[in-house]
Amino acid sequence: MSDFSLNLTHRPRRNRKSATVRDLVRETELSVKDLVYPVFIMEGKGKEEPISSMPGMTRKTVDKLLLEVQELADLGVKAIAPFPAIADAKKNPKATEAMNPDGLVPECVRRVKEKFPDVVVMTDLALDPFNSDGHDGIVSPSGEILNDETVDILCKMGIAHARAGVDFVCPSDMMDGRIGAIRKALDSEGFENTSIMAYSAKYASAFYGPFRDALQSAPKAGDKKTYQMDPANRREALYEVSLDVDEGADIVMVKPACYYLDVVREVADNFDIPVATYQVSGEYAMLCAAAGNGWLDRDRVVLESLTAIRRAGAKMIWTYFAKEAAKLLRAADR
Ligand code: PBG
């Protein structure tokens, strides 16, 4: 014993003394099986366009997406969430294109499920990509976002996606009562096995900026604060989640992820259904920008951010880093 010995009973560092010991005591595992990859799609054939605020991400036509889905499946990423970029000519104040059974999203679902029946496809239910006003709901002449009228459209949209064979519909609109209404609508058409992943605690966040660039779907007027949640609120998230659970959600989501991990933890502690979270476009863009400047080690922050989300209690993580993380996890396993 050296002269400096503190005679400690507890030396927590013993459990960190080697990589193998650290592996043995690790409390949280990040797996490729936890990841959902959001992808941006557009109409046409053979086209792919970069998204400037999301380096490495592109908008692509469905034929190109099929190639990427093969690549993802080979890496073990078996869940995708397509988001459509809709031409301005197809947008209107009633978002009618959202209900088109032959629209871009149902077409994408059909083609992916036909070629990759085991890949899980999760589609967004919200009107913003289809609505000339750029809001998730129908806007009244006075500028109000109309709740019940919007839910009626979401139900029809959900049925169109279910008919195309989608695994999960994911209402991201934050209208009241939509989970129950969509569940009832799906069941009445015989789609009892179509699941609902509810964006239950979705905050009115500035971190969605790059996503709105990607789809050119930003609101034309006003903001989304009358339907998305105030970032200052925590208890309200539990209230929203409890309503969605009662209305029949299969999975609930907290969004964004990394600035809202306290909310993720509380939802995970208070409810017994799986919790998802979405590492959103702004979180992706921030890490890309800092890493691109050489200020952060990209590989390490990608895995650290995703592990932190798992530690907070989320099971499923939607992330634009899914493909990259799958490669990193595979390399780390060797
Ligand atoms: C559409 C929707 C949005 C996101 C997912 N679904 C944008 C918004 O609500 O304004 C954001 C995802 C991201 O930023 O990565 N309702």
Image (cartoon, rainbow, N blue to C red):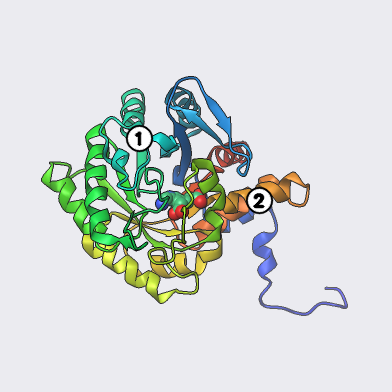
Other-residue count near label 2 (Cα within 10 Å), few / some / many at <14 / 14–19 / ≥20 = some
Question: Going by the picture, which residue comes out furthest to the top?
Answer: 46
Q: Position of residue 237 (x, y in %)?
A: 39, 69
The amino acid at mark 1 is Val
- Ligand 1 within 8 angstroms of badge 2 C-beta: no
Quadrant (top left/top right/bottom left/bottom right) for the N terminus? bottom right
Q: Secondary structure at mark 1?
A: helix
Q: CA distance from mark 2 to mark 1?
A: 29 Å
The residue mark sitting in front, 2 or 1, is 1
Q: How many marks?
A: 2
| Cβ atoms at labels 2 and 1 below 8 Å apart | no
Look at mark 2 in the image and give the residue it sits on.
Answer: 287
Residue at image point 36% right, 28% down: 112
**Residue under circle 1?**
105
Corner quadrant of residue 244: bottom left
Along the line of sight, the residue nearer the viewer: 283 or 85:
85
